[in-house]
Image (tube, coloured by chain):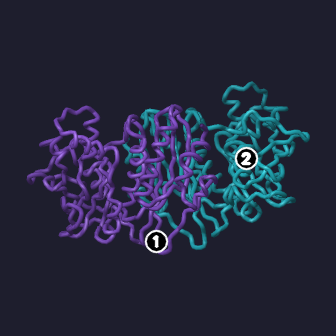
Chain colours: A cyan, B purple
Amino acid sequence: MDEFGIIARYFAPLAGDSAFGLRDDAAILPQRAGCDLVVTTDSIAEGVDFFGFDPPAAIARKALRVNLSDLAAKGAAPAYYLLNLTLPATVTPDWLAGFAEGLAQDQRAFGISLLGGDTSATDGPFSAAITAFGFVPQGRMVRRGGARPGDDVYVTGTIGDSGGGLAIFRREVHSLSDADRDALIGRYRVPQPPVDFAGTLREIAHAAVDVSDGLVADLGHVAAASGVRVVIEGEQVPLSPALRALWGEQAVRRAVTAGDDYQIAFTGPPGLTGPFTRIGHVEQGEGAHVRIKGAEMVLPQKGYRHF
Amino acid sequence: MDEFGIIARYFAPLAGDSAFGLRDDAAILPQRAGCDLVVTTDSIAEGVDFFGFDPPAAIARKALRVNLSDLAAKGAAPAYYLLNLTLPATVTPDWLAGFAEGLAQDQRAFGISLLGGDTSATDGPFSAAITAFGFVPQGRMVRRGGARPGDDVYVTGTIGDSGGGLAIFRREVHSLSDADRDALIGRYRVPQPPVDFAGTLREIAHAAVDVSDGLVADLGHVAAASGVRVVIEGEQVPLSPALRALWGEQAVRRAVTAGDDYQIAFTGPPGLTGPFTRIGHVEQGEGAHVRIKGAEMVLPQKGYRHF
């Protein structure tokens, strides 16, 4: 099957009206009055962000969701995406059908549509770059640079589950129940970014970031962009029972550097309550630090390093 | 050097105001009143679209220009771009500096700026996916689907030069002067899309496409989208003296299927004159066909196939 056949068969059915059925060189990106258009782009590659044996629908959903997570952390509602696929010659029609079905499923779940893309062949592993577009009311994008001393620090969901799933794939010895094991693996394969939380986030957050490189590393980005020190109170970091069962006493230490969480960490006034957990506070100074039982936790590295 | 170091050192200097110095998860895409925002995305990969020994600045410029070509063919003026780089572990600081310098050079040449991107590591070859944004006056994007019987067909520049440069790299025997050889190789390495022609194109074209897969293949897309037959008059296809010297009697046949031209083919009313060449006409029917000396040229394949 050639590029045009692949596009017509698997991807054209995913395209919205302004994509012209993916039969043009370009698409028009519809604008919304009174809104800013927010754009982000993120790639995933076989052997780095997923395994070749992962189900193709899960790979597709992960490729999309790592981008939806970035939009959510900016307070933006997702609307459209572009897809650049780099396909090894060994790809099969079944695999492509599964991949497209994963996209279709998440398009329905999140109310988004495909605008366009590009497909090319490679001698190397499969990779997918997605560019996602969302809208925020004008001037309301939540930035990394808005944290101030006196803020508290909050995070959605639980931290470290995806890292636990990856550890299991890497053959870490464990005695989890099948349900706990599958829950952690599921979080690694298909992130659960809090897309619906974006509207609330815009109202309450001073600064926000999506947790992709690791909680400490990503809050370090907030600290750097804001010119403040972020203190994470280790005991407060929300961990799932499955992750505690996997990592025991090492759970906090490993969870805060694991990465691939695709939850939102944010700062705002003290005393906020909602579908999130208070995990620390903001001081004058610099960097992101974890304190546990009053002492600073020394971490070998603060998060995932790409190189 | 890690991802953040690479971004801060080589790419942050290329970013415009709304990219927040590439220190956020996302960027805001500025809108323009009275304009449609046009988006396109295209990747290039080592071993497919360029050679590993090509100068990094040329690779960067090609990655950008294959996208600027798509925008120009839609009548859009380029404004911003996103960059997804997939880097092998062997990449050096010198190579990255050269690549960034190529981007900087073309940003100045075309008045565009970097909005954001993503950098990831690979065990495979280098690749770059670029997403480019441009503006057209509302409702004025030139489509593939507007060709009608009675139109003439036109093309900017000359066709086949890039294919000639690639043939030379593939060790095709030739007796060109050094200047002719370098001219063809230069066209392969750094396309020359007619970006400044976009405004005129909007005024005169009924349908347009950028010539990337090959003149016959791309006019075939116009024919399919418009429901017409495109007839290319082989004698009229503009060829450079260097390409005629390289390919002799085979020049037309090879040029119309070579691809990688990044010129604009378009249809419009008969009798147009300007910085382009009339190469054929539109009839009722289907497909794109080449006639030479009154007979249809039989082509083994109509253009570059990605798989």
Q: Residue at x 76, y 43 (%)?
A: A159
Chain ID for label 1? B
Indicate the position of residue B78 as horizontal and vertical percent values: 43, 61
Label 2 chain ID: A
Q: Position of residue A58 (x, y in %)?
A: 60, 42
Q: Residue furthest left?
A: B293
Q: Residue at x 58, y 38 (%)?
A: A55
Viewer-proximal residue among A181 and B72:
B72
Seen in the image, is B118 located left or right of residue B196? right
Which residue is most to the bottom? B34
Q: Rate crowding at label 2 as few (under 14), some (14 to 19) or many (20 or more) other CA atoms within 10 Å.
A: many
Front-most of A168 and A159?
A159
Q: Of tags 2 and 1, which is closer to the observer? A: 2
Are tags 2 and 1 found on a single chain?
no
Q: Which residue is mark 2?
A: A220
Residue B35's disc number: 1
Q: Quadrant of the C terminus of chain B?
A: top left
Q: Is residue A255 above or below residue B217?
A: above
The amino acid beneath tag 1 is Cys
How far across and how far down the image is residue A135, in percent?
60, 64
Res A203 quadrant in image = bottom right
Residues at marks 2 and 1, CA–CA distance in whole angstroms = 39 Å
Asked which secondary structure carries label 1, the reply is strand
Asked whether the viewer can see residue A183, the reply is no
The amino acid at mark 2 is Gly
At 30% across and 53% down in the image, what residue appears? B211
Name the quadrant of the N terminus of chain B: top right
